[in-house]
Amino acid sequence: MSATGSEIETAYRKLKSYVYYDKTDLRLRERLAKFECSDKFEANLQAVQQVADAAKPAADRRFKRWLRQIGCRVVPKKLGPPRAATLAADELGGKFITNVTSAPSVSVETVNYFFDGPIELHLIAVLWLMREGRHLDAKFLPECCGSRLSPRLHEENDDSLQLFTKYHEQYSRWRDTGIRKAKQLLVGERRSVAILGLDLREYFYRVAIDFDQVREALQATGALRDEGALLDCIEAIGVAYHDCIAPLLSRTHPELAESEPGLPIGLCSSLVLANWYLQDFDAAVLKTVRPAYYGRYVDDILLVVSASQDPNKGDKNPVAAFIDEILVRPRLLKAPVNGTYHLRQRPTLQLQQSKCILQYFDARHSIAGLEKFKKKLEQNGSDFLLLPVDEADNSMEDVAYELLYEGSVNKFRSVKGVAENRYELAKHLARQTILHLVTDDPPDRKVSQGLQNFFKGRCAIEYFDLWERVFTLLGIAGDRATAKTFLKQLQGEIPRVRHADDRVTKELVANLAQHLKLALSLSDSVCEEDIGLLELLEDVPAEEFRRANLLRHHFVRAPLLNFTTYTGPLSERVLKTPAKHDPHKLAWTPRFLNFDECMLLAYSGNVQLGKATPFDFASTVFEAANRHAPTGVKWVEGGDEADSIDRVERA
């Protein structure tokens, strides 16, 4: 197999980059690492290409075998309220507030299902996006902000790593543009403004796509290939996945009709189809309502409307009155039944009034609330890039919890509860990890104890997505004792998870146990070869994560050390012996390598240069990874090292 030029190779690189930047689906990351580390890696890639190029790929025996391997991940979505919250709601009984989160059992009210299938099916989905899905995306309105394909994908002969545009850029554009428009109307035009936020209930489960209509849409663009042979595969994957989750879905979501297959969450093709399903609704809102701003981020909708009068005037609920005025009367939504609205164009889709948020700002009054919200958004956008000295010593208790008030913050009686702050906790973990990377400070016992105190009972399960970050922090800090205690603590909490249905409980416990193993594996692939925990778990794929280079590169202390044959801890400061650059890791890199990184590797003393100059070595590494020679750089003979790069190419 050649190193470049093949469609399936490009598809694999795009899938790998997509998975690499995802922070949540560790199971897919594990599947991809094992797929690449297999002795049959190249043969398996070719098998996918052959199936995709077949006259009827959905009828191919290999494709049918992959369908039979489809499974699902079941994860907690919403936990039941703790007993303390129930007591606090009883005003006649007084207020009871506690920091105790431990309990004999942790109740899970609702769950989410994620697609868990062989990498071959994920590659089929990527190939469909490359061949046909991109033509659907090209027709979406700019107001469709979420899960948009990368512009590079619309170029002919694209061989880049990009599949979707960056998540944070899309989300910021969707949210910030609406806030800026509201401020413009209030300040610049002195017009009162209403901001309406809508959320489609269980969107991916309730989508009822007619694939014949998708074929017609592709036919209209002139992009339909082989009468939609690959689209047949996407439809077959969806049907097989629905059949897989149907027994559990009937227990957790009994109100969903069996005839609605929905879209598999976690399969990349679903994101484009989810946007396509609502494109007519987008156009109808823009034409009928004509809002000052309309933006949709997959299933989250934001409207900014110039409001001539306060929605709170009158006897009717202001949220219901406003939705009735701008969406029900123009016949975009049906009249509500028990607080639930249905889209007229897509009747299986629902909006719940209880989940709608309406903010009204009168131009004659203060807009301090909107200003404060806007500044907070701007601040949060850069928080993970900053390491404020005055916050570095804050304890877990300072950042992970916040008091909830009802009335003046200066009165003890105004305290109505204590809540965990996920965002501040994530920032704190990132700060502490970076601190240990840039310093040689010993483990902070106060931080270690705070982590153990926080991740108990409900908090241990509700914040399961942060387990990996905790293990990474402890590993880089070299705190083996706390890491071992933390692992055993989580192993004790997982069996306490309970759902109303015993079979769902079993699936939740199994999936959380699997996630714990993968969280430890991913942190272990960066921190240490063995921090004393591997013997407590079976089949830990840390080595596969490292060989496939699917680890978190921002925790590698020396630039590009993970692209070498070095086998020691990637977080250590000094290597005992220099390594060699790894051709396989460079050829299948999940990210773009900047030329300055290549130069830093050449000058680090961590790699053997042979007879090559540092510049030539860096150029070789750059070209091997990015599949083209560096441009815009030159080597100045006899010059100062700092002046050797005239301009550094950036991704």
Image (spheres, rainbow, N blue to C red):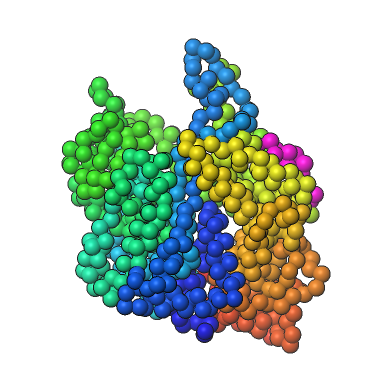
The residue most toward the right is 576
As drawn, 316 above or below 517: above
Residue 416 picture location, percent across and down: 53, 22
Q: Residue at x 66, y 34 (%)?
A: 397
In the rendered image, residue 475 lying in the magenta stretch gets the answer no
Q: Residue at x 61, y 40 (%)?
A: 495
Q: Is residue 217 left or right of residue 386?
A: left
Q: Is residue 69 left or right of residue 333?
A: right
As drawn, 367 above or below 144: above
As drawn, 404 above or below 469: above
In the rendered image, residue 446 lying in the magenta stretch gets the answer yes
Residue 521 visible somewhere in the drawing: yes
Residue 528 picture location, percent across and down: 74, 59
> Between residues 337 and 479, which one lies in front from this camera angle?
337
Residue 186 visible somewhere in the drawing: no
> Between residues 221 and 407, which one lies in front from this camera angle?
221
Q: Is residue 170 left or right of residue 611?
A: left
Question: What residue span does the magenta drawing correspond to?
Answer: 441-455
Residue 347 picture location, percent across and down: 24, 45
Q: Residue at x 60, y 71 (%)?
A: 37
